[in-house]
Amino acid sequence: MPKGTALKDFVEVDDIDLSSMARAAVFSSEHERIDVSGFTPSAFNEYVAGTTEQTLTITFYGAYGTGETHQTLWPIHRDRSVVVIRWRPDQTAAVSADNPELTANVQLLTYGSPNRTRGEAETYDAVFTAADENGFDFIITPTP
Amino acid sequence: MTRYQVTGTFPFRGHKPGETFDDELSPEQEARAKAAGAIRVVKRTTDDDAQKDKGGEDA
């Protein structure tokens, strides 16, 4: 697999393809680190994994027209809806081991629009947080 | 089963703007997508939905 440039990412929220309105995607999956160290001659710490926090942050362009980002995302945030989100590196290729799709049932807990500065393109972050026990996962076979 | 038309700017479930498709969306998702202007109901085909839609499909 060659080194790549992020150009063709696929971003879908609640079945609406918002790829052309997104400009960045950052996934974070972090297990809490629990210190279970005991007294040892080496003095090294010992950890086990605790609870897991997962978020997918998408940077969107601000757009307020019918069916655009604000009208799609704000109600999801406002109403605390649980929706499906999908991201994969290449929208022109099917889901595969080389083009894995990150997906989860999520809530949009942090919504950042408007975020406007005179003379600049409006962008803002939407932070999607896993909403059920399944969390985020990468799938490598297309969903039917 | 319901027939929808993609009315928004962006593809919906892989269907391009202007296309129609048959699917069974949850009432909540359908309401969100309609409110966002992403889709409209063209025709409902199940008895329950037909009853629900006696007032007519979306304009």
Image (cartoon, coloured by chain):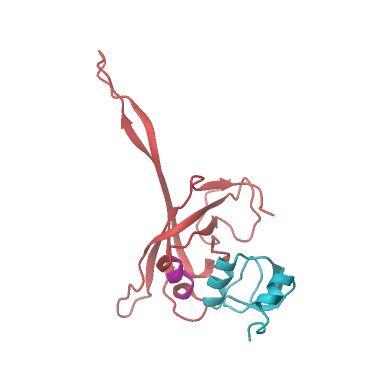
Q: Does A16 sit left or right of A30 as displayed?
A: right
Chain A shown in which color? red
Give the vertical position of A83 relative to B34 (above or below): above
Supply the letter of whichever chain is cyan: B
Residue projecting furthest to the top: A41
Point 49% across, 70% down: residue = A21
Residue B34, image quadrant = bottom right
Q: Residue A120, image x and y in percent?
A: 34, 76
Quadrant of the image containing the N terminus of chain B: bottom right
Q: Is A45 located above or below residue A24 in the figure?
A: above
Residue B26, x across and y down, in percent: 60, 64
Q: Does the magenta segment cover residue A73? A: yes
Compared across the picture, whether A59 is left or right of B16 comes to: left
Report the span colored magenta. A71-76
Q: How far across and how far down the image is residue A41, in percent? A: 25, 13
User: Which residue is found at the position 46% from the left and 66% from the top?
Assistant: A76
Q: Quadrant of residue B10?
A: bottom right
The C terminus of chain B - image quarter: bottom right
Q: Check the image and report above or below for B54 versus A126.
A: below
Question: Which sits in the foreground, A63 or A120?
Answer: A63
Q: Is residue B16 left or right of residue A87?
A: right
Q: Is residue A31 magenta?
A: no
**Tally of numbered discs:** 0
| Dominant SS in magenta | helix
Residue shown at 32%/80% (left/top)?
Answer: A119
Q: From what the image shows, is residue A30 above or below residue A80?
A: above
Residue A62 placement, left or right of A97: left
The structure residue drawn at horizontal position 50% and vertical position 56%, both measured from the top left corner, is: A5
